[in-house]
Amino acid sequence: MVTQNRSGGRNRILVPGAEQAMEKFKYEVANELGLDYNGDLGNLTSRQNGYVGGLMVKKMIADYQSKASGQPYNEQSVMQNQTQV
């Protein structure tokens, strides 16, 4: 039987030393969505937190795809169709 090391939840940083960068990224995305994140001490709804996480993943995938294809990353294409929360 394989056990997982869970420190407070399912999400964990896979690359050592990336914690601060991911925290900064989270704040940037929340700001883009017009949310006052402030470390979310229960102030945001689950839906709002979902928007933040979803957009983070969307941007990370777009960045990876642009690097893999050799084309420049265009944030405008990622942000189109995004609505205010």
Image (tube, rainbow, N blue to C red):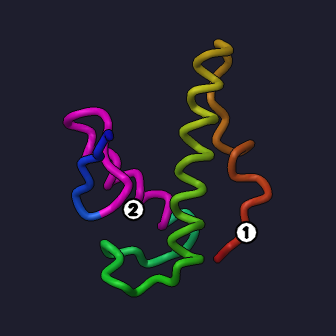
Spot occupied by residue 76 in the image (x, y as percentages of width and height): 70, 45
Q: Earlier in the sequence, mark 2 or mark 1?
A: 2
Query: What range is drawn magenta here?
Result: 9-30
Q: Nearer the viewer, residue 1 or 28?
A: 1
Circle 2 SS class:
helix
Q: Residues within 10 Å of mark 1 (few under 14, many from 20)?
A: few
Q: In this picture, is 81 found above or below 1?
A: below
Cα separation between marks 2 and 1? 17 Å
Q: Quadrant of residue 82?
A: bottom right
Q: In this picture, is 8 found above or below 64?
A: below
Q: Nearer the viewer, residue 81 or 45?
A: 45
Q: Quadrant of the N terminus?
A: top left
Q: Quadrant of residue 61?
A: top right
Residue in the image at 29% along x and 33% along y: 15
Q: Is residue 4 magenta?
A: no
Q: In this picture, is 5 found above or below 63?
A: below
Check disc 2 and give the amino acid type: Tyr
Q: Quadrant of residue 66?
A: top right
Q: Nearer the viewer, residue 9 or 58?
A: 9
Residue in the image at 67% along x and 73% along y: 84
What number is the disc on residue 83?
1
Spot occupied by residue 29 in the image (x, y as percentages of width and height): 50, 58
Residue at numbered disc 2 = 27
Spot occupied by residue 10 in the image (x, y as percentages of width and height): 37, 56
Tell me: 40 left or right of 83: left
